[in-house]
Amino acid sequence: MAAITMRGITKRYADGTEAVKSVDLDIADGEFVILVGPSGCGKSTLLRMIVGLEDISDGEMRIGDDIVNDRAPKDRDLAMVFQNYALYPHLSVRENMAFPLRLQKVPEAEIMKRVEEAAAVLELTENLDRKPANLSGGQRQRVAMGRAIVRDPKAFLFDEPLSNLDANLRVQMRTEIARIQKKYGTTTVYVTHDQTEAMTLADRVAVLRKGVVQQVDSPRNLYNSPANLFVAGFIGSPSMNLVPGLLTGTSLQLPFGTLELPSDVAQRLGNAQAGERQVIVGIRPEHFEDASMVSDDVKGQGMLFQNRIENIEWLGSELYAYLPYTGGDAIGRQLDQLAGDLDMEQSSGDESQLVARLDAASRVREGEDAEIWLDSRKIHLFDPETGEALARPPVA
Amino acid sequence: MTASTIGAERIGATTAPAKAGTTKGAAKQPGSGAIWKIGTAVIVAYALFPVLWILSLSLKPAADVGDGKLIPTNPSLGNYRDIFTSGEFVRPLINSIGISLITTAIAVVIAAFAAYAIARLDFPGKALLLSGALAIAMFPPVSIIGPLFNIWRATGLYDTWPGLILPYMTFALPLAIWTLAAFFREIPWDLEQAAQVDGATPYQAFRKVILPLALPGVFTSAIIVFIFCWNDFLFAISLTSTEAARTVPAATAFFTASSNFINPTGQIAAAAIVVTVPIIIMVLVFQRRIVAGLTAGAVKG
Ligand SMILES: Nc1ncnc2c1ncn2[C@@H]1O[C@H](COP(=O)(O)OP(=O)(O)OP(=O)(O)O)[C@@H](O)[C@H]1O
Ligand SMILES: [Mg+2]
């Protein structure tokens, strides 16, 4: 087990693509860090540089106290679980798991002991003598993990290990991975583009965009206090509503109403707030509510507005309402670019839509106007030019 | 034989559920089933009859050869004894085995390197190389036999083992390259990286992971190449003149009987059976592999 330290890690491919740009990341001993980001942002490249399958173009990679830039994968003592599992098809499950140990010339008795142990942990004991081709997806996944844990390596590296499994199995294996990582306490770097995996598994999550680390923080902090528009839009499902706002003094004008900034936000904004100013306002769906469901003493902490309800999705425990509004395109450029990066659908023309998560007991109806309450204490403000968060709420 | 039983099974399998189905289907199915069976039987008989006939000939003593009966009246293994004792057959058999094995070995080794490069690397002219190899394999051998004969006479390759191995290579190599490249493309090369992460040196990764996966492909193309060489008649008859290099298919044409006045038909038949049987056994045993190999690459072009 060991810490992994990256300083200015950069990857330039032969064709000039800069897949990873000057990444600084400290992964503590025993920590579970997840790399997330949209497709092509360089997650796999970064992981493969850690394990040694890609050369590092620039920067310094340390595992424990050693600089490993020029070490072959076999000398880094890391275990990797590949997306396609990369099991050896000609070897039985037992031999697959024993493979790394045999290369280390571990005594036969010890190998068998460790393989049996790992198989017991992974509930593979009955399948030890079968070939990978005869296993189910979940079992193959377990074998791949078994091959990693028998070695007791310095760190586990996972590249989208669950993406080939169906939804149910994915949830099950996710729990399994969490359990095993806890049991062994091994430093783990895990790549995924599934934010549920990231939020549920990680101690800390690193969000990447086009090879640049945007924010590294606990899942909770990422959600509650995104550092910029990209993180705000990427983390959370359904994603945060982003609307244009005009800041005048402590009042914030939104396309569907005007609210008074809570004093702590105004304070944090400090002298950043001089005269009139365009901002992008981020509102999570759950920070809207059906006004009739909000008690009067809380109502004062937010803004009330009338809006038509275009569409309702009722999921039993919660309810999503879609609220159309006009004037959402005032801040076009940043948002369009963001939408492109996030594969989000872009609002077409003048009309935009808010997503609001309302109390499931709410009586709002499709096609009718309703009074909606917005919690002003929970809004996020972003600079429309740089996309940086303004007056970030303090970490909970 | 195998073909007919497989066919029958398949028909049984398709008709059984149909009978449980609609009456219309049930009424129609047995009829077409019978046609299928008859058709299969006819084709199998048509294909196997000459083989049976040769088998029958090989078991007949010289006097009975012309009797026109399928079942020999006085079956004997005399012809087999004759060909193995006369030397007319044994030496060509050695030539056949030697030349085929050497060609196979060289072709597969060279083709393995070529196919590896084709499957794994991007180099200029790759497509050209592949289509060139294919074009050569498609070349009608008859069109080069004349010039080859003259060149071989001039260079002293005529009637030698290398004199046959060389032209065989021309056709065996493309065959092997195509089959092997198709196999190599199927190998999950990621495994090499997985092995390296698991602590293997590049050489260990190759030997312990890639090689075991590549062997079946190598083996298959070896069989295909071997059969190609073994069966050749044209080069063998044109480029050899004595027992120094004459292979069995050519040698049977020159068989002389023990007595000058008897036709060597029986011995020729026995020789044909002796060289056919190993191939039939090989094909039956490795049926699946060979079909996979042929459909994977060689036949694609
Ligand atoms: N061998 C290569 N040569 C050139 N560019 C490459 C190479 N491999 C990857 N890239 C580029 O580097 C970028 C990052 O690729 P990478 O595979 O790390 O993405 P990723 O974040 O893992 O994406 P995904 O979620 O789709 O797996 C991409 O733009 C990709 O096109
Ligand atoms: Mg990837």
Image (cartoon, rainbow, N blue to C red):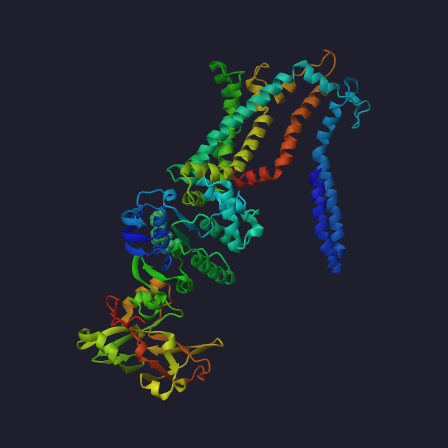
Q: Nearer the viewer, residue A147 or B255?
A: A147
Considering every residue shown, the one lying at the far right of the view is: B73
Task: Say if A265 sits above or below B51 in the image.
Answer: below
Task: Say if A180 sits above or below A70 in the image.
Answer: below
Q: Going 28% across and 55% down the picture, which residue do you hit?
A: A24
Task: Say if A16 sits above or below B210 in the image.
Answer: below
Q: Is residue B182 visible?
A: no
Quadrant hosting residue A247: bottom left
Q: Going 70% across and 44% down the picture, which residue do you hit?
A: B7
In percent of width and height, residue A238 lies at 40, 70
Quadrant where the N terminus of chain B lies?
top right
Q: Nearer the viewer, residue B23 or B221?
A: B221
Q: How many marks?
A: 0
In percent of width and height, residue B130 lies at 45, 36
Task: Say if A128 sits above or below B149 in the image.
Answer: below
Q: Nearer the viewer, residue B93 or B34?
A: B93
Q: Is residue B123 visible?
A: yes
In percent of width and height, residue B78 lies at 75, 18
